[in-house]
């Protein structure tokens, strides 16, 4: 049981820093921030959850079965992540590529302390065993002394390495195109890893720098023991609200321009680009098929097709697919039947995942997985883990990955340029936060 208190309150950038600075005393921290994005679909401006009462941490084997039992037994708020490699539980596949991060494949926790922020208030929700700490904690946060940000270490910059060389990337994309030409697949998301070793990184500083650059609607800071993720994701994977489920895949990317008229022209060109639209529509069809496995018959609809959404770094094409599900349908079953998300795999899905595994050089892990939460009533909301930095503090290994959809119309050189565009924010965040 929880004790909840609600106070009038408005979030500010300074208060966010106080809140996250206070949270660092705990081993488990998750901060979800919409950055007040105007086209969001959520009632929360931001959520902070800290300090695990119970934890589920496991590898892929029967991971969804364990998660369903955990969610149904706790009947409480659960926060955490699903790594991409849970595909091995869903489809009996394998992951044999290099893993420098060594994150658990599934990690959820039941927080003792949660803060829900709306535009005008904060609701503080504490488990009864710690409810006497609400006033003390809130006062500590309000009066937290956040250390001044020091200058970046220019003398010892982070050296970013490519797991896949540029020449190897071109060769692998051409192999992917050969699979498409033979009819093995129609589309596949091909990714590459950028990494650095022996890194002494400031987690909070890295997150703040990334969030300043990108200001995305699914931004997050995640700390689970010595595993960290800093995300500027613009993409929702799946959300359930009662009988309603929506998915919002992204496919189609274009750079921003400083000049307003030029920027508007780029956005319009993206919306009308046949290749970018075909990428998006193929994934929409895949998501429709995935949702039909759990939906009330005839309820799957495309609510928005190839809408242009604008972010700090890029324009994106986003579609929204919705459906109705029976109230008694277990939430974890809905996720399992649609996981991994179509925007990060390809079509046909299983064939694409098999080919991806043979061509990529790094295990994806949490990248292109999902981070989010379950509510006590089974509602949930999860992002797609893209535009993210991962850090294993124990091994001092830092990594980020980027990818793009390969279709019959793909030109390897242009796909590589798109990867570098997507990687720009993460590289800048690491350079500025070291």
Image: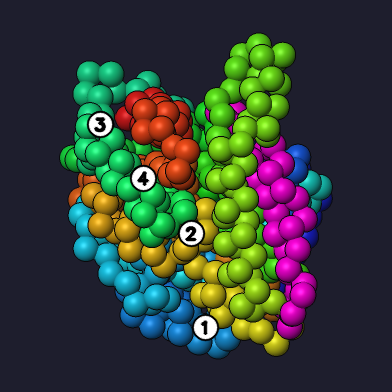
Give the magenta-colored segment's residue range: 297-326
Q: Is residue 189 left or right of residue 252?
A: left
Query: What label sits on residue 68 in the rendered view?
Result: 1
- Pinpoint residue 136: horizontal percent, then vertical percent: 60, 58
Query: What label sits on residue 347 in the rendered view?
Result: 2
- Pinpoint residue 65: horizontal percent, then vertical percent: 45, 85
N-terminal of the two: label 1 or label 4?
Answer: 1
Confirm whether residue 29 shows in the render. Answer: no
Q: Which residue is mark 3?
A: 166
Mark 3, Cα crowd under 10 Å, few <14 / some 14-19 / many 20+, is few
Residue at the spot x=32%, y=30% of the render? Answer: 434
Q: Which residue is mark 4?
A: 177
Compare residues 212 and 89 and report the one nearer the observer.
89
Confirm whether residue 408 shows in the render. Answer: yes
Can you say whether 234 is above or below 320 in the image?
Answer: above
Residue at the spot x=77%, y=55% of the render? Answer: 303
**Alpha carbon separation for disc pair 1 and 2:** 27 Å
Can you say whether 171 is above or below 125 in the image?
Answer: above
Q: Is residue 115 left or right of residue 340?
A: right
Residue at the spot x=62%, y=41% of the render? Answer: 277
Residue 113: within the magenta?
A: no
N-terminal of the two: label 2 or label 4?
Answer: 4
- Pinpoint residue 241: horizontal percent, then vertical percent: 74, 69
Mark 4, Cα crowd under 10 Å, few <14 / some 14-19 / many 20+, is many
């Amino acid at each position: 049981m929880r004790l909840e208190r609600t106070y009038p309150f408005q979030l500010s950038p300074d208060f966010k820093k106080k809140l996250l600075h206070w949270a660092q005393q705990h081993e488990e921290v998750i901060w979800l921030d919409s950055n007040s994005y105007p086209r969001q679909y959520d009632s929360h401006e931001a959520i902070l959850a800290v300090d695990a009462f119970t934890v589920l941490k496991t590898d892929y084997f029967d991971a969804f079965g364990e998660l369903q039992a955990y969610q149904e037994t706790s009947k409480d708020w659960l926060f955490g992540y699903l790594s991409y490699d849970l595909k091995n539980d869903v489809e009996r596949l394998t992951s044999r590529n290099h893993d420098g991060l060594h994150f658990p494949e599934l990690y959820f926790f039941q927080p003792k302390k949660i803060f829900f922020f709306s535009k005008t208030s904060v609701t503080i929700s504490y488990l009864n065993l710690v409810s006497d700490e609400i006033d003390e904690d809130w006062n500590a946060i309000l009066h937290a002394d956040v250390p001044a940000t020091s200058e970046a270490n220019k003398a010892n910059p982070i050296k970013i390495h490519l797991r896949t060389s540029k020449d190897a990337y071109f060769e692998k994309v051409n192999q992917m195109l050969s699979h498409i030409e033979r009819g093995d697949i129609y589309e596949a998301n091909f990714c590459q890893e950028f990494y650095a070793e022996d890194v002494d990184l400031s987690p909070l500083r890295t997150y703040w720098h990334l969030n300043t650059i990108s200001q995305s609607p699914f931004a997050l800071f995640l700390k689970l023991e010595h595993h960290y993720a800093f995300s500027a994701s613009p993409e929702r994977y799946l959300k359930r609200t009662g009988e309603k489920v929506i998915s919002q895949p992204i496919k189609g990317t274009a750079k921003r321009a400083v000049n307003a008229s030029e920027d508007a022209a780029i956005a319009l060109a993206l919306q009308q680009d046949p290749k970018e639209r075909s990428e998006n529509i193929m994934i929409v069809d895949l998501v429709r098929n995935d949702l039909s496995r759990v939906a009330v018959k005839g309820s799957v609809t495309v609510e928005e097709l190839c809408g242009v959404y604008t972010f700090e770094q890029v324009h994106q094409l986003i579609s929204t697919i919705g459906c109705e599900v029976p109230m008694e349908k277990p939430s974890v079953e809905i996720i399992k039947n649609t996981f991994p998300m179509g925007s990060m795999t390809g079509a046909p899905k299983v064939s694409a995942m098999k080919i991806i595994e043979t061509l990529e050089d790094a295990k994806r892990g949490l990248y292109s997985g999902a981070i989010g939460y379950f509510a006590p009533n089974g509602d949930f909301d999860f992002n797609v883990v893209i535009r993210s930095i991962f850090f294993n503090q124990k091994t001092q290994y830092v990594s980020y990955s980027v990818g793009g959809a390969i279709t019959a119309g793909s030109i390897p050189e242009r796909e590589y340029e798109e990867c570098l565009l997507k990687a720009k924010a993460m590289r800048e965040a690491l350079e500025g936060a070291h």
